[in-house]
């Protein structure tokens, strides 16, 4: 179940960066997408998604994961005008979702320390700057590699004291012995289906724990 929590954590983490975009003080978000590959450093990788796509427009943003076990679709979406986000699961045409109030997620950032690093990383021929986030207890650390050289302004603030705008091209998450590395493989500008940002009417609402329990049943 911890591995599946990492999938949801990645979604929430990226959404924290993007959730402020679209306000009157921010640039308008242009439609487009960023494709990523996901490397899981864990013994239980069977069925886990190895790819994901971040789609964004002026309406909202969405993370689509590669299907698990070839039939379980995972999507994390947020409309900028709403204060909550949704984690959606499609299991062979049967849909369910859980709602995440963003204020509950962002309130946990006071347990995180942030550092601007001198480290640079080249991704897709872009020289990326690096920010590292650590929990106060150092149970986990996250490195974010971003560039402001792309004509994409989908990244905003995770913590109030650090103002970062640009496109996230790489993320490294270390939690004790587990490691997840995400790197962009393609960036494109194109129109985005507006239905990606809303919950279909035939989806059933569940709690976060219920959804984890369902997914965990497939992984076992």
Image: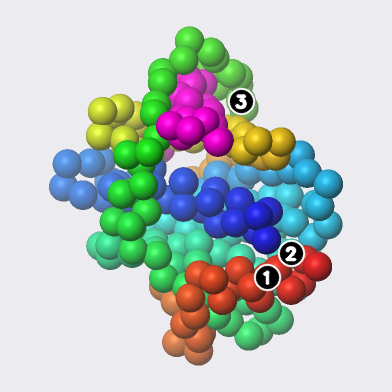
**Magenta segment: does it hold 135?**
yes
**12 or 121, nearer to the observer:** 12
Question: For the residue labelled by badge 2, is the local secondary structure a helix, a strand or a loop?
Answer: strand
Measured along the vertical axis of the image, is residue 58 above or below residue 27?
below
**8 or 184, nearer to the observer:** 8
Name the residue beneath numbered marker 3. 123
**Nearest-to-viewer mark from 1 and 3:** 1
Q: Earlier in the sequence, mark 3 or mark 2?
A: 2
Residue 194: percent from the left, percent from the top?
42, 68
Quarter of the image that includes the N terminus: bottom right
Q: Residue at coordinates 25% horizontally, 34% vertically from top-left?
A: 160
Task: Give the extent of the magenta segment.
Answer: 128-152
Name the residue beneath numbered marker 2. 68
Labels 2 & 1 near each other (Cβ < 8 A)? yes
Question: For the residue labelled by badge 3, is the local secondary structure a helix, a strand or a loop?
Answer: strand
Q: Residue at coordinates 29% horizontally, 56% vertically from top-left?
A: 103
Name the residue beneath numbered marker 1. 215
């Amino acid at each position: 179940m911890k591995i599946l929590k990492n999938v949801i954590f990645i979604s929430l983490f990226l959404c924290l960066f993007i959730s402020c975009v679209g306000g009157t003080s921010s640039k308008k978000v242009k439609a487009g997408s960023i494709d990523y590959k996901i490397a899981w450093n864990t013994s239980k990788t069977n069925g886990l998604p190895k790819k994901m796509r971040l789609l964004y427009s002026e309406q909202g943003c969405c993370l689509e994961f590669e299907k698990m076990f070839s039939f379980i679709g995972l999507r994390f979406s947020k409309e900028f005008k709403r204060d909550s986000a949704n984690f959606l699961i499609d299991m062979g045409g049967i849909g369910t979702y859980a709602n995440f109030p963003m204020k509950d997620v962002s309130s946990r950032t006071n347990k995180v320390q942030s550092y601007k690093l001198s480290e640079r990383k080249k991704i897709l021929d872009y020289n990326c700057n690096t920010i590292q986030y650590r929990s106060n207890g150092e149970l986990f650390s996250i490195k974010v590699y971003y560039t402001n050289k792309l004509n994409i302004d989908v990244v905003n603030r995770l913590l109030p004291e650090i103002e970062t705008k640009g496109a996230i091209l790489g993320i490294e998450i270390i939690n004790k012995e587990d490691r997840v590395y995400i790197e962009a493989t393609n960036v494109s500008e194109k129109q985005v289906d507006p239905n990606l940002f809303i919950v279909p009417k035939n989806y059933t609402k569940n709690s976060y724990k219920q959804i984890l329990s369902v997914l965990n049943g497939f992984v076992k």
